[in-house]
Amino acid sequence: MRGAVLRRPSTSLAVLAAAGVLALGACSSSGGKKAEESANPAPGAGPRLKIAMVTHSGPGDTFWDIVQKGAKAAAAKDNVQFLYSADPDGGKQAQLVQAAIDQKVDGIIVTLAKPDAMKDVLARATAAKIPVVSINSGANDSAKLGAVAHFGQDESIAGEAAGTELAKIGAKKALCVIHEQGNVGLEDRCAGAKKTFGGDLQNLFVQGTNMPQVKSSITAKLQADKGIDGILTLGAPFAATAVDSAKEVGSKAKVGTFDMNKDLIASIKAGDIWFAVDQQPYLQGYGAVDELWLLKNNGNVIGGGRPVLTGPAIVTKDNAGALEAFANRGTR
Amino acid sequence: MTQAVAEPPLKGPGADERLERQSALRRLLGRPELGALLGAVALFVFFSVVADAFLETSSFSTVLYASSTFGIMAVGVSLLMIGGEFDLSAGVMVTSSALVAALVSYQLTLNVWAGVVISLAVTLALGMLNGILYTRTGLPSFIITLATFFMLAGLNLGVTKAITGNVASDSVRDMDGFDSARAVFARDVDVAGVNVNVTVFWWLLFVAVATWILLRTRVGNWIFAVGGAAASARAVGVPVARTKIGLFMGVAFCAWFSGMHLVFAFATVQSGEGVGNEFSYIICAVIGGCLLTGGYGSAIGAAIGAFIFGMTNKGIVYAEWNPDWFRFFLGAMLLVATVVNLVVRRRVERSP
């Protein structure tokens, strides 16, 4: 271990080493104000850290863009060098985590969409004494895989909140539009919504990467079942498309959705979309970077070993105006 | 070749099968699109029986819309496949094209029609680049367009993010020219009380033009020739390189049109869209009778292929089958359609 310290000219360790030298070489061999100050730098003035975030995001996803913005904001404040990489494939995501370990980062932020694929590599991170924080999905596996904290939304709880909202706007028979087949988080949302909705909630699969197909599939479903009076989409861009489909068929179905973006806020204000269940992705990125910084500089753990919930935060016509400015700059 | 013709025929005149007079039925059976047509009819009957809502005219319009969004791209892709090449960048090129139009109009605050025209130029240049890279290097088009596929996917995200700070283009819905552009690219047309998206009519027009080019013009002969045997085609004076570059640009044109539909139907464009769609277009062309090896196929066949694809895609929704099995059903239906296609063609080949 000591050899590793000598080979690695890391600033954080250099500071600690300098503190040690001071403590040894100065008048008092131990204790004293000087030792305390140099060994425990004041919060906010910590040494430069390098933190890597590795997610399962595909490229060009609004959601992960906001997560990154949160992480970068916290990184700028905390004097952190922030690195981001992502791959939707579990095995490749694990390789990216390994790459971060090889880079000897000071902390790793991961998503656990495929917990089994991440198990071995996270054990290696723990062995290398690199603290891990998990975000987004995988609340149940987080502690088991050695993560010190988890920031995310419990998809079932968020689903339940959406189900309640759907019932509140008076829907009796609704659709849950899943835009990525086989995604556990999306299935959980629909299952959660079913629990609290009370009415009849059916799942509909659409191909999220092909918007005309999303539109025609929702149109087809509304034509097949004229009794549908509510649509729940699981991503912001699909909500606007669902509104188009409903208009085209002449359906009275009311649309609610998960997640947020600036167009959505405008639609909610205009009354086209009734509600949005926001899991506050900004908070996930911001919180995770802050947690790693706090852990390094003050030994703090947020959440007491339990997942920290960043959502659901419900956005309706009532509070859309207050959030508009934030959504417009792409952080909500 | 010359020698074989010069030899005296052994069985008297008419022994050369190419010169034999064929019966009308046999000629019909020899068309590349026949198998696909039978598959389409079989699927149509099937869904009419199992799905109550399927036969309503408004439902049929939805199926046609879904088919047209595949079908417009399948026109360009099928011609390219007849010419013996693939374009794996076709799916993301649609998104690139849409992003160019949306970003240019919004960022420079131009009339959206300016964005439409600039996008056309950029997209055609992309197709030309594919073609020139292919003809200059002689590498398989599969590799060339795989490379441009990745590059375009990266550019879509990188440029959008650099310009807007977000991963989607800003909405152009309230800009000058949006309504007129929407009327051209994404309007609903009332046909006897049913709303039909205008893309359906453009699709039919593109198929007609492509069929005319293939069957009635010299360029059409060139396309079949470069796909069937490029070396021989070159030897008899066909401009192989120009034909292939033109075919790549044809795909680019279709990508531009599809991209414009994306912009004016949905107003914002997600930069990550389009990945994976290239295979749907190839599937449409193959179901419609295009050979993967080139030299054989038809634009009408590809249109029927797109119709099968769209019908299956939406028919499963109308039938209200368990959505967990959606992709299984989709795959099974496609397999049935292509096997019918194959069986019919084999029958025709075997029968005297």
Image (spheres, coloured by chain):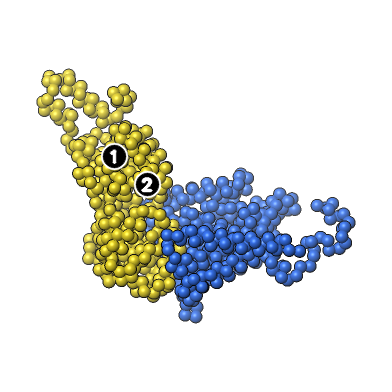
**Foreground residue among B42 and A289:** B42
B79, above or below B41, in the image: above
Residue at (39% x, 69% y) in the render: A244
- Which structural element holds mark 1? loop
Say yes or no: labels 2 and 1 on the same chain.
Answer: yes
Work out whether residue B321 or residue B155 is closer to the camera in this orientation and state it. B321
Q: Would you identify the image quadrant in which residue A121 lies?
A: top left
> Is B205 placed above or below A305 here?
below
Q: Give the chain coloured blue.
A: B
Q: Is residue B184 visible?
A: no
Residue A232 placement: quadrant: bottom left
| Mark 2 vs 1, N-terminal side | 2
Q: Residue furthest bottom?
A: B192
Residue that numbered label 2 is attached to: A114
> In the image shown, does B312 or A98 lie closer to the viewer?
B312
| Residue A32, percent from left and from top | 10, 26
Q: Name the kind of residue labelled 2 in the image.
A: Lys
Q: Is residue A102 visible?
A: yes
Q: Position of residue B262 (x, y in %)?
A: 45, 62
Question: In the picture provided, is B320 more to the left or to the right than B250?
Answer: left
Q: CA distance from mark 2 to mark 1?
A: 15 Å
The residue pinned by badge 1 equals: A146
Q: Secondary structure at mark 2?
A: loop
Report in which chain the residue with disc 2 lies.
A
Q: Which mark is residue A328?
A: none
Chain painted yellow: A
Q: From the image, which quarter does the C terminus of chain A lie in? A: bottom left
Residue at 29% x, 56% y: name it. A156
Specify the quadrant that holds the N terminus of chain A. Answer: top left
